[in-house]
Amino acid sequence: MTEAIKKKGLTNARRNSLIGLSFLSLWIIGFLAFTLYPIILSGYFSFNRIIMGVNGTDYEFAGLEFFDRAFNEDTEFKPKLLESVGFIAYATPIIVIVALILAMMLNRNFKGRTFFRAVFFMPVVIMSGPVISELLGKYSVDFSVATPSLFAFIDSLPQIFRSPCMFVLENLVTVLWYSGVQILILLISIQSISSELYEAASIDGASGWEKFWKITLPYVAPTAAVCALYTIVELANDSTNSVNTYISQKMFDNKIGYYSYSTVMSWIYTVVIVLMLLIVFLLFGFFRRKENK
Amino acid sequence: MKIKSNIIRRTLIGSNEKSGLVVNLIMYVLLISIGFVFLYPVLYMLINSFMSPEDLINPAVSWLPSGFYFENYAKAFKTLDFGSSFFNSLYITAVSTLLQTAVCAVTGYGLARFRIPMKGLFLALILFTFVIPVETILIPRYVMFNTYKLLDTPLTFWLTAFTGQGLKSAVFILVFFQMFRSYPISIDEAAELDGAGKYRIFSHIALPMVKPGIVLTVLFTFVWYWNETRQSGLFFGTAIKTLPMKLGSFAASYSEVYGAAAGTSDPAVSINEAITLAGTMLSCLPVLIMFVILQKQFVESIAKTGITGE
């Protein structure tokens, strides 16, 4: 038996995993060349000043100079970072909640369901940076102007409630336009809940409201978490995002070491985004544990 | 009396089995108003793109133009250089889509059907490539492509797509992983007993099993690559102009084509809202038509792949 293995050179399990790796090989090469290496390179750029000369590129050690610049000297970076992060922090819960409500409405049986599904999904198809700035920037409905009485009511609310409400009204279209994929994913999740659960609850005399809190919500919570993470990533990578525009803008500025400063800013941005993702992840994990107890 | 009120109650509010008139009415009002919010920018674009310069100035004309004024489209067509930019968008997107779909399927199969050392690590790294903001990677990639003289060529897109590092590749790899894992392995084993090799099993048995996944990847990759402007702006510079890129610099190219700055007072030559909107319409049109035709596939492919996070 051992003789046979030696002859073949490989055990079956080894062969199996080698073939498996061959399936993965393209991705592994890509990861090393187009993700890992760039990350290392960008780490190098962050601590070195790039000098473009006639005979090629030179690097000069700069230490924490660019970080210092981002935090202490640049008056534009921090407000822009706050603006983008604030937008993500506001928009993500709104998108997930709106998507959940729309998904539940679409889950009902009514005429024209396919049509509405298509309408809610359409932005995913045509949404690109220039289209957004062309359409949503200028021509979308601004509800704070369209409904002055509602506006006046919200204005009288305390600050904590006022700003999210104002934000929803001012950015309603933008927020809705980002929820296409999330609506569909949540809809599918809702549809996969077994109808027996609802029937059993009805027999026990549960109202629609109770059924939502006790059945629908716990069931779709993991999917909602995935949607929240997806939304954050999607919004963070949006090219119309003010930090992203600023970073691309500074890429070719020779006074601040070309890409160096941009990479430093994108690292800071990355850290903030990853922190947000972690918070969402932990929040949902926390609720889940509570649910299980 | 009680029975009568019960009947009224049932028709208006509804019972457990069937929702009543009032509930349905509220539903429709809500859906139509939200649907309108979704559609408003698109409707606005469609209607205003047909307005003549006179209509735009005339305060009496606000929603319906006095006639179909196709001149805007003619001008936008020329400004966008539609023929060539459409072709650029089409071939760059189509090739990227094919490469990305192929490599995501292969990678997903490898992860789902083989015993690979450190599989958890691979899955974590794939998730990592999705989560990390592109900003961090984009600049070094630009420097790399610059060093290897790949800038200004579509290879910048194709290479990353072909190695599973393209736009949202990670999502599709995970979709394929999920799908390949969920059909019974005994089908693969039966084929193996009949003498099929692993690669043959993949191409002849596994791939046809995950058709919805392929449809999903092709459709979404196509749309996302078509609409991508940040990477294309960085990597193609001015060498290759895709349709959305042309739209991004619409005002500038308009004054180049028609030799008139945006501020000129002569309404016959100067750029106006209607022309810009016609341009926006033209740049959305190809994917919009595709969506109208394939609408069902778009929506159902997500359902059929069974990816909902459970």
Image (cartoon, rainbow, N blue to C red):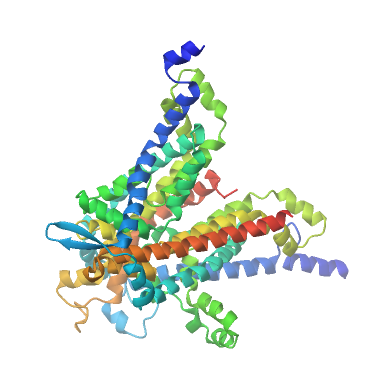
Pick the quarter of the image with the N terminus of chain B: bottom right
Q: Is residue A275 above or below residue A190?
A: below
Q: Residue at x 52, y 71 (%)?
A: A90
The answer to whether residue A1 shows anywhere in this view is yes
Q: Residue at x 33, y 43 (%)?
A: B162
Q: Position of residue A137 (x, y in %)?
A: 38, 74
Q: Position of residue A175 (x, y in %)?
A: 49, 68
Q: Is residue B126 above or below residue B273?
A: above
Splitting the image into 4 quarters, where does residue A110 fall? bottom right
Q: Residue at x 56, y 26 (%)?
A: B186
Q: Nearer the viewer, residue B57 or A91?
A: A91
Q: Nearer the viewer, residue A252 or A49?
A: A49
Q: Nearer the viewer, residue B178 or A288?
A: A288
Residue A219 is left or right of residue B69, and the answer is right
The answer to whether residue A240 shows anywhere in this view is no
Q: Is residue A50 above or below residue B29?
A: above
Q: Nearer the viewer, residue A267 or A180?
A: A267
Q: Residue at x 49, y 43 (%)?
A: B121
Q: Position of residue A166 (x, y in %)?
A: 52, 80
Splitting the image into 4 quarters, where does residue A81 fall? bottom left
Q: Position of residue B99 (x, y in %)?
A: 34, 42
Residue B205 is left or right of residue A189, and the answer is left
